[in-house]
Image: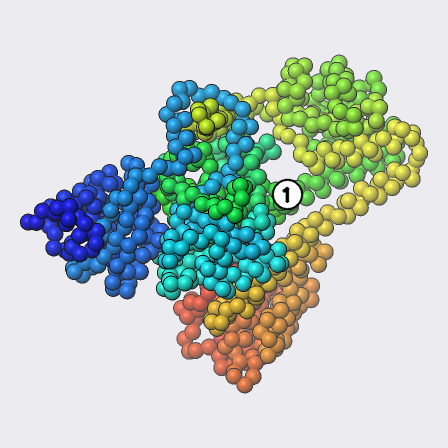
Amino acid sequence: MSDPSPSRTQDVLDGSVDLDGLSPEDLDRLDQGVIALSADGRVLSYSEGAASQSGLSAEAVVGRHYFREVSPSTNVPGFHGRFLSGVRRGRLDEAFEFVFGRTPHPLRTRIEMRSSASPGRYWMVITPLEQVGAGRSREAVMAAVGQRVRAEPVDPGLCEREPIHIPGSIQPNAIMVAADAESLEVLAHSANIGDILSDGVPIEGRPLSAILPAPFIASIEAGIVAHSLEDGRLLRQTIALAGRPDERFYAVAHVQGGRVIVELERAPERPDDFGSASPLDLELAVVRLRAAGTLDEAARIAASELRLLTGFESVLVYRFDEEWNGEAIAEDMVPDWDRPLIGLRFPSSDIPAQARALYHKAKSRFVIDRDCVPVPLVAGKAAGNGPIDLTFAQNRTLSPIHLEYQRNLGVNGSMSISILVEGRLWGLMIGHHRQQHYVAPETRAASTVLTDAFAMRVQEIEAHAQWAEQQSHLDIEGRLVRSLAQSDDFVQALTVGSTTLLDLFEAGGAGIVSEDHISLIGACPSEREVLALAAWLKETLPSGQPSYTTDALGSAHPRAGAYAQTASGLLAAFVDAQRMHLLLWFRPEVPSAVTWGGDPRKPVIAGSGSVAVLPRRSFERWVEERRGVSAPFLHWQVSLAEQLAQAVEGVVLRQRRKIEELTQLLVDKERLLAQKDLLTREIDHRVKNSLQIVSAFLHMQRRQITDPEARQAFAETSGRVMSVARVHDSLYQAGSVEEVDLGQTIENLCNDLTGLAGNQHSVELTAEPGLMVPYQKAVSLSLIATELVTNAFKYGGSEDRGAQVNVSVSGVANGVTLKVCDDGVGLPEGWDTRAKGTGLGMKLVRAMLEQIDARIEVENVPGACFTVHA
């Protein structure tokens, strides 16, 4: 048995020693860690050096998948991807540097991967180079953790002043270059730039074209001229670098602060290597999401679909309230997830204001390894003194305070995607993983698209619910305004009769203060208490503020604590500028228990040294018994109260100046009532426009693709998107907001499909006029028609002529019949939708049939003929 001496160790480094010739004892004596792997990445042997480096024994790792289970931080294209590529080509010979962040101490190493003489066996040699720090900010946080002796609340504003947009470093999975936006000369770069450069020449001051290929540079220049790379808009391409023709990199560029920032990530050799999401995965997820009828259902579907796409162990939907406290309203998780967050609330200090502002600008951020060692940015002299603004950088490092928060939560890999509804930060999609977790760029992009689809569905559901509630209140207010118009006594008009103030806003009580006279209906405080409340409002409200609302009156007006059970909630609207007349609505106390993820009274904790604050460490369920709080009044309810007060003002100040002004107010109210369908139609109009934009993007992408099958796939997807857009267009045009004229919709759809196909085909349509069907059925039948007509175009024609397609839509006793026939050669003998229809189109047809409980018949007459009974 040979004895590995220092020279033998150096020989191993040089690759001159045949590892196959060393015994297990020899391998254990080496300073390096030596690991034998099978072709599928499982550990066959694990030397003592490897065990010492990782803190894991051979018994604990042999038989396990090294990249996914033993060391998940290596499950990235730059490490595991190299191994897979070498195994596939039959010759593994790779050498590179890698920093392990989760060893007992962060360790920079040299990695060598070689083929073994034994078939199906491969060697990996890990040579320690140096122990490295986790970065000054991370070290400062950990030092503060070690010196903390007690939890002590501090000013939350300290958190909000942390400069999280200029961290000065990026995650090690990426490489970054920053250049001047005018000259495109390199100003700064990440310290790992050597991973893609072979000449060793410093790049500061060199043109960006010295690193990146000419076509990508041309796209950057065009984007700068068109201002299309600003405000978070990104240029994405897959590129090859000079001297590396067999490697592909994802390149993402944007402009921020007069600098072009380019991020590069090694791309997987094959999408399946790291679970890249396919267009079909995304399309079917969006279809399921669109079918959700309630917000809770949409949130559950979104969490489930995002977890399937990304592979996170837990994905939750996190919603902000008006005070920026958060609540996990849906969560999908693996069975053994040990810290469910569903139903818990979190104080606003967990995501401070400047973090929310960053979420509003940059929509997504993914962390592969919480404990990674950040790669610093190196700036040349020409970069000036200003730090590089990484607001929109995909791979910027996160705040060390935020990472410590994740550590306290027991989370390593993470994801957060902003849910923006009508331009406001509604909430976040949050992914959690207990180990390091890599998500491929295509999957990240698909996750953002799916989150945007959820945001659109939230907008639709909330707008529809608000519209329905508003219509009810507008009807009541309209009746009150009519009563005012016919009465000389506004108090009697609002408090006596079949419709009164009490019918508005789900109030428990209502009242009017008119000078010193009090009129009360329902459950209210006493007249004396109401007079005192009116005096307090008159003194407290700033001049020019016509209304006041609260759901915790006792907190603002201590005297109200005596009648909290009756009036914890208050909506008040002054009628006149002198504040002599006042309308009031009261809501009773609603005792409740709010379950927080930790005590919300201790949002942040004092740190030490350069770290002002630290994240809280406890996330145990903390139940707060809430008293003196009512259901809140909504903004639109306050607006309606102010409008009613204005209507009353006409009676109070002008006495009976009679019917003209009140009639005009009535006309205005009736005009609002007449707009009850407009809101829903406007929603459908916006959705249609958004879908048309998506279709246009698909057309643009199609023109850049030369592969015929890919072009056809983009054309078919564009047709599917357009079919849904046509349904929303029909809703917008129709008088009804719930039903669609199916014949008109199919006719417009056939015209669109004929145009997309280049007009070489023709469609003859027979449609029963005025055939109205529910929205969901219209969507499904439109998608089915799209697939059947598209297939008729593809297979029903011949080389010398286009297809002649007959489409008919008719009503029957229990529904509708859709028929699509062509004049081609017909279907092969024995063809069946279940057995033969295995393409994406027929899968989508079957999915739509199941959604609306429909069936399909297929025959040759003599061309192919499909009949759908729905």
Q: Which residue is mark 1?
A: 465
Task: Evaluate whether residue 402 shows in this view.
Answer: yes
Q: Residue at x 69, y 63 (%)?
A: 770
Task: Evaluate whether residue 815 shows in this view.
Answer: no
Q: Residue at x 74, y 35 (%)?
A: 639
User: Which residue occupies the extreme bottom position in the image?
Assistant: 800
- Camera-nearest residue between 816 and 486: 486
Looking at the image, is 242 positioned above or below residue 591?
Answer: below
772 left or right of 535 in image: left
User: Which residue occupies the extreme left position in the image?
Assistant: 1
Q: Quadrant of residue 691?
A: bottom right
Report helix, strand or loop for mark 1. helix
- Residue type indicated by callout 1: Ala
- Camera-nearest residue between 193 and 562: 193
Q: Residue at x 35, y 37 (%)?
A: 133
Instruction: From the top left corner, tell me how far across and down residue 268 is, in percent.
Output: 38, 58
Instruction: From the top left corner, tell me how far across and down residue 270 is, in percent.
Output: 37, 61
251 left or right of 223 in image: left
Instruction: From the top left corner, tell me how far across and down residue 538 is, in percent.
Output: 77, 20
Instruction: From the top left corner, tell me how far across and down residue 445 is, in percent.
Output: 49, 53
Q: How many marks?
A: 1
- Camera-nearest residue between 577 and 3: 3
Query: Quarter holding the C terminus?
Result: bottom right
Classed neighbour count for the residue bearing mark 1: other residues with Cα under 10 Å, few (<14), some (14–19), many (≥20): few
User: Which residue occupies the extreme right position in the image?
Assistant: 657
40 left or right of 732 in image: left
Q: Quadrant of residue 817?
A: bottom right
The color scheme shown is: rainbow
Q: Quadrant of residue 670?
A: top right
- Camera-nearest residue between 215 and 811: 215
Looking at the image, is 301 positioned above or below residue 708?
Answer: above
Q: Residue at x 62, y 45 (%)?
A: 423
